[in-house]
Amino acid sequence: AQKITQTQPGMFVQEKEAVTLDCTYDTSDPSYGLFWYKQPSSGEMIFLIYQGSYDQQNATEGRYSLNFQKARKSANLVISASQLGDSAMYFCAMREGRDSGAGSYQLTFGKGTKLSVIP
Amino acid sequence: DSGVTQTPKHLITATGQRVTLRCSPRSGDLSVYWYQQSLDQGLQFLIQYYNGEERAKGNILERFSAQQFPDLHSELNLSSLELGDSALYFCASSPGTGLSTDTQYFGPGTRLTVL
């Protein structure tokens, strides 16, 4: 089974509008972390936001916020006031396992959502 | 700029050849991860090193190997290259402190084209 599912291959949003990118995850581990990365057409992977499984509040970083619904196993990224520079691929990723110091914390990625911001 | 550097940025080579990709982690980071991004497989974890020691292996082929040196830079060696090895190879680094917010920061990637 897919551990990270991003059901929207592509999305369009009008400039200055808000947009939600969906991500659902599957894990039986009680301790995990969820990450969102942005990949512009230039190719680099840019870290956007992190949510820990034990965090009580939804994470926010500037215009990015994470709508974390633990019971539904969803971690949707909300981008407010979209800008043309937000056009990119967005990847949701999960790290499983309790931190025990220098452990193995590889990320499992979803297939991504291509966001296009329309002027 | 994430602070992670990768060289070269582009690499074009022929089938059967061997190449080495280099990564320098962010200052202070002890963990280095290698990922492969291809159109058909998406982003896949290959291997992780922590402070010079191999920590975890993912979907890494036997033709591929890696190491992390005392100065913490890492190299990924790809040999007997095949057309299907063409991909974007990322290096990422993290502090490896064990804190819950241990975040991986990615380098710009090396685009490998095998002809």
Image (cartoon, coloured by chain):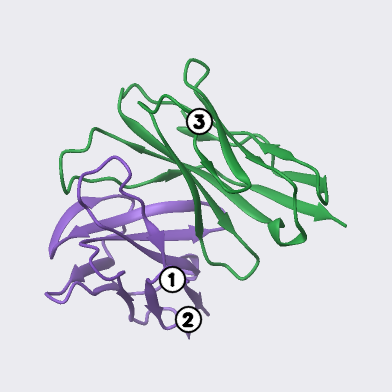
In the drawing, what numbered circle is on residue B82? 1
The amino acid at mark 3 is Asn
Q: How many marks?
A: 3
Q: CA distance from mark 2 to mark 1?
A: 19 Å
Q: Counting residues from the N terminus, which is met first, the one under dot 2 or under dot 1?
A: 2
**For the view shown, which residue lies furthest in the front direction?**
A62
> Label 1 near label 2: C-beta < 8 Å?
no
Q: CA distance from mark 1 to mark 3?
A: 44 Å
Q: Camera-side residue: B97 or A111?
A: B97
Q: Which residue is mark 2?
A: B9
Crowding near the residue tagged with mark 1, few <14, some 14–19, many ≥20 C-alpha atoms within 10 Å: some
Point out residue B107 in the picture as x, y percentages from the top left corner. 42, 69
Q: Camera-side residue: A1 or B98?
A: B98
* A51 w.r.t. A1: above or below: below
> Label 3 near label 2: C-beta < 8 Å?
no
Quadrant for the C terminus of chain A, please.
bottom right
As drawn, is A75 to the left or to the right of B67?
A: right
Q: CA distance from mark 2 to mark 3?
A: 36 Å
Crowding near the residue tagged with mark 2, few <14, some 14–19, many ≥20 C-alpha atoms within 10 Å: some
Q: Which residue is mark 3?
A: A58
Residues indicated by labels 2 and 3 sit on the same polypeptide chain = no
Secondary element under disc 2, as helix, strand or loop, is: loop
The amino acid at mark 1 is Glu
Point out residue B80 in the picture as x, y percentages from the top left corner. 34, 74
As drawn, is A52 to the left or to the right of A42?
A: left
Whether residue B78 is visible here, answered yes or no, is: no
Q: What colour denotes chain A?
A: green
Judging from the image, what is the letter of the chain drawn in purple?
Answer: B
